[in-house]
Image (cartoon, rainbow, N blue to C red):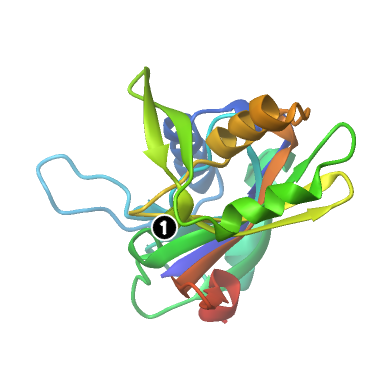
Amino acid sequence: MIILKHFKVDDVSYVSHKDILRVLQRGLKRAGVDVKYSQGYVPHMLTYTTTPVPLGVQSVAEYFAVECNGIDKDEMLVRYNASMPTGMRAVASFYKDKNPNLAAIVTASDYVAVCNGNLPKEIENIANCQSYIISTSKKGQAVEKDVAPLIYGLRVENNKLYMRLASGNANLRADSVVNHLNEKYEVDIKINDICRISQLVGEEGNFIDVEELLK
Protein backbone atom coordinates (compact mmCIF):
# COMPACT_ATOMS: atom_id res chain seq x y z
CA MET A 1 0.00 0.00 0.00
CA ILE A 2 1.43 3.38 -1.07
CA ILE A 3 0.04 6.61 0.34
CA LEU A 4 0.61 9.97 -1.32
CA LYS A 5 0.29 13.34 0.37
CA HIS A 6 -0.88 15.82 -2.25
CA PHE A 7 -2.29 19.31 -2.78
CA LYS A 8 -5.72 20.45 -3.87
CA VAL A 9 -5.08 24.11 -4.63
CA ASP A 10 -5.74 26.92 -7.11
CA ASP A 11 -8.37 26.03 -9.76
CA VAL A 12 -8.40 22.39 -8.63
CA SER A 13 -10.05 23.46 -5.36
CA TYR A 14 -13.26 24.02 -7.35
CA VAL A 15 -13.33 20.44 -8.65
CA SER A 16 -15.79 18.13 -6.86
CA HIS A 17 -14.56 15.19 -4.81
CA LYS A 18 -16.03 12.64 -7.26
CA ASP A 19 -14.24 14.28 -10.17
CA ILE A 20 -11.00 14.42 -8.15
CA LEU A 21 -11.23 10.65 -7.70
CA ARG A 22 -11.62 10.24 -11.46
CA VAL A 23 -8.58 12.45 -12.09
CA LEU A 24 -6.52 10.48 -9.57
CA GLN A 25 -7.44 7.12 -11.05
CA ARG A 26 -6.93 8.22 -14.64
CA GLY A 27 -3.59 9.68 -13.63
CA LEU A 28 -2.50 6.30 -12.28
CA LYS A 29 -3.40 4.71 -15.60
CA ARG A 30 -1.41 7.34 -17.52
CA ALA A 31 1.52 6.74 -15.17
CA GLY A 32 1.45 3.02 -15.94
CA VAL A 33 0.92 2.01 -12.30
CA ASP A 34 -0.27 -1.58 -11.84
CA VAL A 35 -3.16 -0.86 -9.49
CA LYS A 36 -4.98 -3.75 -7.82
CA TYR A 37 -8.72 -4.16 -8.39
CA SER A 38 -11.54 -5.50 -6.25
CA GLN A 39 -12.83 -8.99 -6.98
CA GLY A 40 -16.55 -8.15 -7.04
CA TYR A 41 -19.05 -8.27 -9.89
CA VAL A 42 -17.99 -4.76 -10.98
CA PRO A 43 -14.23 -4.53 -10.26
CA HIS A 44 -12.91 -1.14 -9.21
CA MET A 45 -9.50 0.28 -8.37
CA LEU A 46 -8.44 -0.23 -4.75
CA THR A 47 -7.83 3.42 -3.92
CA TYR A 48 -8.77 5.32 -0.77
CA THR A 49 -8.99 8.96 0.32
CA THR A 50 -9.70 10.87 3.51
CA THR A 51 -12.71 13.12 4.19
CA PRO A 52 -12.75 15.75 1.41
CA VAL A 53 -12.63 19.49 1.95
CA PRO A 54 -15.67 21.56 0.88
CA LEU A 55 -15.77 22.81 -2.69
CA GLY A 56 -13.60 25.91 -3.02
CA VAL A 57 -11.53 25.24 0.10
CA GLN A 58 -7.87 24.58 -0.67
CA SER A 59 -5.66 21.94 0.92
CA VAL A 60 -1.97 21.10 1.16
CA ALA A 61 -2.65 17.94 3.17
CA GLU A 62 -4.76 15.49 1.14
CA TYR A 63 -4.00 11.77 1.26
CA PHE A 64 -4.53 9.18 -1.47
CA ALA A 65 -3.81 5.51 -0.79
CA VAL A 66 -3.27 2.96 -3.56
CA GLU A 67 -2.96 -0.82 -3.52
CA CYS A 68 -0.55 -1.63 -6.35
CA ASN A 69 2.19 -3.95 -7.60
CA GLY A 70 5.74 -3.54 -8.84
CA ILE A 71 6.52 0.03 -7.78
CA ASP A 72 8.14 1.62 -4.72
CA LYS A 73 7.00 4.80 -3.02
CA ASP A 74 9.71 7.01 -4.53
CA GLU A 75 9.01 5.94 -8.10
CA MET A 76 5.28 6.34 -7.44
CA LEU A 77 5.85 9.96 -6.35
CA VAL A 78 7.75 10.74 -9.56
CA ARG A 79 5.23 9.04 -11.86
CA TYR A 80 2.26 10.59 -10.07
CA ASN A 81 3.59 14.14 -10.40
CA ALA A 82 4.42 13.60 -14.07
CA SER A 83 0.80 12.70 -14.84
CA MET A 84 -1.11 15.15 -12.63
CA PRO A 85 -1.97 18.87 -12.83
CA THR A 86 0.20 21.15 -10.69
CA GLY A 87 -2.76 21.92 -8.41
CA MET A 88 -2.70 18.27 -7.29
CA ARG A 89 1.08 17.91 -6.93
CA ALA A 90 2.23 15.31 -4.38
CA VAL A 91 4.89 16.29 -1.85
CA ALA A 92 5.50 13.00 -0.04
CA SER A 93 4.95 9.24 -0.38
CA PHE A 94 4.78 6.50 2.23
CA TYR A 95 4.65 2.70 2.24
CA LYS A 96 2.55 0.58 4.62
CA ASP A 97 2.05 -3.19 4.62
CA LYS A 98 -1.65 -2.71 5.37
CA ASN A 99 -4.21 -0.04 4.60
CA PRO A 100 -4.05 2.50 7.48
CA ASN A 101 -7.72 3.32 6.79
CA LEU A 102 -7.17 7.05 7.21
CA ALA A 103 -10.80 7.87 6.43
CA ALA A 104 -11.80 6.01 9.60
CA ILE A 105 -9.06 7.19 11.98
CA VAL A 106 -8.65 10.88 11.10
CA THR A 107 -10.49 12.89 13.78
CA ALA A 108 -9.45 16.52 13.16
CA SER A 109 -8.05 18.92 10.60
CA ASP A 110 -6.07 22.14 10.92
CA TYR A 111 -7.01 25.06 8.67
CA VAL A 112 -5.72 28.55 8.08
CA ALA A 113 -8.09 31.22 6.76
CA VAL A 114 -6.80 34.56 5.46
CA CYS A 115 -9.00 37.61 6.06
CA ASN A 116 -9.12 40.80 4.02
CA GLY A 117 -8.29 42.94 7.06
CA ASN A 118 -7.58 42.15 10.70
CA LEU A 119 -9.64 39.73 12.77
CA PRO A 120 -11.05 40.44 16.25
CA LYS A 121 -9.16 38.52 18.93
CA GLU A 122 -12.44 37.66 20.66
CA ILE A 123 -13.08 35.01 18.01
CA GLU A 124 -10.71 32.79 19.99
CA ASN A 125 -13.21 32.71 22.89
CA ILE A 126 -15.60 30.59 20.80
CA ALA A 127 -13.36 27.57 21.38
CA ASN A 128 -13.96 27.87 25.15
CA CYS A 129 -17.77 27.90 24.96
CA GLN A 130 -19.74 24.98 26.40
CA SER A 131 -22.32 25.48 23.66
CA TYR A 132 -22.13 27.49 20.44
CA ILE A 133 -24.90 27.43 17.86
CA ILE A 134 -24.35 28.29 14.20
CA SER A 135 -26.48 27.89 11.10
CA THR A 136 -25.26 25.25 8.66
CA SER A 137 -26.62 23.68 5.50
CA LYS A 138 -27.71 20.04 5.30
CA LYS A 139 -29.07 18.70 2.02
CA GLY A 140 -29.86 22.24 0.95
CA GLN A 141 -31.73 23.08 4.15
CA ALA A 142 -30.56 25.53 6.83
CA VAL A 143 -30.19 23.84 10.23
CA GLU A 144 -29.01 25.02 13.65
CA LYS A 145 -26.02 23.09 15.00
CA ASP A 146 -24.13 23.16 18.29
CA VAL A 147 -20.51 23.16 17.11
CA ALA A 148 -18.79 23.67 20.46
CA PRO A 149 -17.80 19.97 20.80
CA LEU A 150 -16.39 20.05 17.26
CA ILE A 151 -14.09 23.07 17.67
CA TYR A 152 -10.77 22.05 19.23
CA GLY A 153 -8.98 25.36 18.85
CA LEU A 154 -9.10 28.85 17.32
CA ARG A 155 -6.15 31.23 17.10
CA VAL A 156 -6.06 34.72 15.59
CA GLU A 157 -2.80 36.17 14.26
CA ASN A 158 -3.37 39.53 12.57
CA ASN A 159 -5.32 38.67 9.40
CA LYS A 160 -5.05 34.89 9.77
CA LEU A 161 -7.35 32.53 11.62
CA TYR A 162 -6.02 29.09 12.56
CA MET A 163 -8.76 26.53 13.21
CA ARG A 164 -8.61 22.98 14.53
CA LEU A 165 -11.94 21.37 13.70
CA ALA A 166 -13.42 17.90 13.96
CA SER A 167 -13.01 15.83 10.80
CA GLY A 168 -14.07 12.36 9.73
CA ASN A 169 -17.07 10.67 11.34
CA ALA A 170 -17.81 13.79 13.41
CA ASN A 171 -17.18 16.54 10.89
CA LEU A 172 -17.35 20.34 11.05
CA ARG A 173 -17.03 22.11 7.71
CA ALA A 174 -14.52 24.95 7.70
CA ASP A 175 -16.65 26.96 5.30
CA SER A 176 -19.63 26.80 7.69
CA VAL A 177 -17.49 28.27 10.47
CA VAL A 178 -16.14 31.00 8.21
CA ASN A 179 -19.59 31.91 6.87
CA HIS A 180 -20.77 32.34 10.45
CA LEU A 181 -17.78 34.51 11.37
CA ASN A 182 -18.23 36.68 8.27
CA GLU A 183 -21.80 37.42 9.32
CA LYS A 184 -21.37 37.73 13.10
CA TYR A 185 -18.12 39.71 13.16
CA GLU A 186 -18.45 41.43 9.76
CA VAL A 187 -15.10 40.10 8.58
CA ASP A 188 -14.20 39.24 5.00
CA ILE A 189 -12.88 35.71 4.47
CA LYS A 190 -13.46 34.14 1.07
CA ILE A 191 -14.01 30.39 0.83
CA ASN A 192 -10.96 30.05 -1.44
CA ASP A 193 -8.85 31.76 1.24
CA ILE A 194 -9.33 28.75 3.55
CA CYS A 195 -6.69 26.03 3.36
CA ARG A 196 -6.41 22.71 5.17
CA ILE A 197 -2.82 22.45 6.35
CA SER A 198 -2.85 19.13 8.22
CA GLN A 199 -4.98 16.12 9.12
CA LEU A 200 -4.78 14.63 12.58
CA VAL A 201 -5.42 11.37 14.42
CA GLY A 202 -6.28 11.09 18.10
CA GLU A 203 -8.33 12.91 20.70
CA GLU A 204 -8.39 16.49 21.97
CA GLY A 205 -5.09 17.22 23.67
CA ASN A 206 -3.40 14.20 22.11
CA PHE A 207 -3.39 14.65 18.34
CA ILE A 208 -0.73 13.39 15.95
CA ASP A 209 -0.25 14.56 12.37
CA VAL A 210 -1.09 11.90 9.78
CA GLU A 211 2.26 12.50 8.09
CA GLU A 212 4.08 11.61 11.33
CA LEU A 213 1.88 8.52 11.71
CA LEU A 214 2.85 7.31 8.23
CA LYS A 215 6.61 7.80 8.58
In the foreground, 209 or 206: 206
User: To which residue does mark 1 refer?
Assistant: 34
Residue 119 located left or right of residue 69? right
Residue 182 appears in the rendering: yes
Residue 10 located left or right of residue 173? right
Q: Residue at x 33, y 62 (%)?
A: 104
Residue 113 located left or right of residue 127? right
Q: Residue at x 88, y 40 (%)?
A: 118
Q: Residue at x 38, y 31 (%)?
A: 144
Residue 72 appears in the rendering: no
Element marked by disc 1: strand
The quarter holding residue 153 reads bottom right
Determine whether 6 is above or below 42 in the image: below
Percent of width and height locating residue 206: 51, 80
Quarter of the figure with the N terminus: bottom left
Quarter of the figure with the C terminus: bottom right
In the foreground, 105 or 96: 105
Residue 108 located left or right of residue 114? left
Percent of width and height locating residue 162: 71, 54
Percent of width and height locating residue 50: 44, 54
What is the count of numbered marks?
1
Determine whether 149 is above or below 21 in the image: below
The quarter holding residue 149 reads bottom left
Percent of width and height locating residue 40: 12, 48
Type of amino acid at the residue the image marks with label 1: Asp
